[in-house]
Structure formats: C-alpha cells, structure tokens
Amino acid sequence: MNRLRWLLPVCALVCFGGCRSNEQAALPKTVNTSPSPTPSVTPPPQPDINEWLDNDAEVRNDTRLKRAWARFEQSQKYKPAQSADRKFVPGESSMSFAIWWGAEAYRGPEFLVAIVVDPSRSDPNRYGMVVIAAPESAGGNYKSYWVARDEDMSRYIIAPASGSVTIQCYREDGTYDSKTLGWYQSRQEFRLK
C-alpha cells in the first residue's frame, strides 16, 4: 500500500514533466536571419559516350552507329556535354545522352541522342542536341540530325521510355516542360514537340 501511495504522484510527475517538455519544444525559437550556406551538390559523373558505345551489345554487333558518332565528333566543334558543362537537377538522372530504339514515327535500328556543347563558347546558349540515326525512310544509313542548336540546354535531361524519348527541360525555378522526340519523315528531320 505504501508503494501505491508513492506511485500515483510519481506517475503524475512523469506525465506533467513530459507535457512540460513538449510545451517547451513548441515555443518559438530565435530565428537566425543570416543566410545559411548552400550545400554543394556534386552531380553524378556522366558516362562516356564512346565507352557506352563500346559496351552496348547492339552496337558491338552493328558498328555503323559507332562509326557515325566518330564522324560527327571529327567533323563538328561540339563535344558531348559532361557534368561540368551542365547544371545539376537534384533528384533527377542527369543523362545527357541515350542509345535507344524508339521515337515517335521512327523506324530503324537503335539511335543515339545527345546534348552537346561548343567548348569555344561560354555563353548559356552554347548547347545543341543531335541524333545519330538510320531511319528506314531516309535510306537506312546512319547520319547526324540536328534537333536544336544555340540554346541553353544546361538543365535538359534525356529520359528514354518505352518506345519514346522524352526531354525534360528544367527552368531555374525547378519547374519543367517535357518534350517528345519525333521523326518527321516529310522533312527528313527529328524535332521536339
């Protein structure tokens, strides 16, 4: 009975103490108005297009895509956009190229779509997008097709999906538009829509 007499006040103290600490936690704290340092986010490293082409089973069996990419690299001032050339979008894959099999209205073997950059320029519009493809309707031979040039593509992400390629175009404020890559047979060109 003696223990029971002390148990009730101890329980009340524990409960009151617990409630009291919750009240203190809910009280407003002093707000620090000095700017907090922005954490540096390092983008994941970009894979190398040539290594990817070397390791892709389809390309190993048919080297025409690899040869067409080599011709593009030799004939153009553009190089593949690397992590250092781009602005990282946290939470998103930062792919600047893809080897894929499907785009709207495209019929042919796998193709390469890549964001490229002119290394001789430093302005935001130094980017381009190129597709190395062999559309059946254009004779089935691999060649390069410019999708866009002289645009700020530093926040563009290539996102292949089943039978299509989507380009996510992020803005400074984090919003974005999605565009789909399509082959336009009548004009013999790839476009974003």
Image (tube, rainbow, N blue to C red):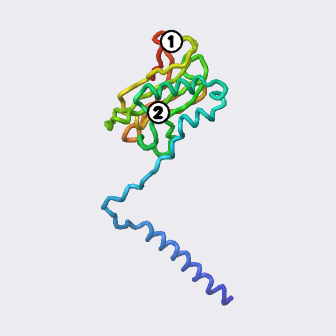
Mark 1 and mark 2: span between their CA atoms? Answer: 24 Å
Quadrant of the drawing holding the N terminus: bottom right
Q: Position of residue 30 (x, y in %)?
A: 34, 67
Q: Position of residue 64 (x, y in %)?
A: 59, 22
Q: Residues within 10 Å of mark 1 (few under 14, many from 20)?
A: some
Q: Is residue 193 something that shows in the picture?
A: no
- Can you identify the residue that label 1 sits on? 185
Residue placed at 44% from the left, 22% from the top?
146
At label 2, the amino acid type is Gln
Residue placed at 58% from the left, 14% from the top?
140
Q: Is residue 154 something that shows in the picture?
A: yes
Residue placed at 50% from the left, 71% from the top?
19
**Horizontal arrangement in the rendering, residue 153 relative to residue 166 (left or right):** left
Task: Look at the picture and state if 68 lies above or below 173.
Answer: above
Task: Look at the picture and state if 189 lies above or below 166.
Answer: above
Residue at the far front in the pictured view: 74
**Horizontal arrangement in the rendering, residue 84 relative to residue 106 (left or right):** left
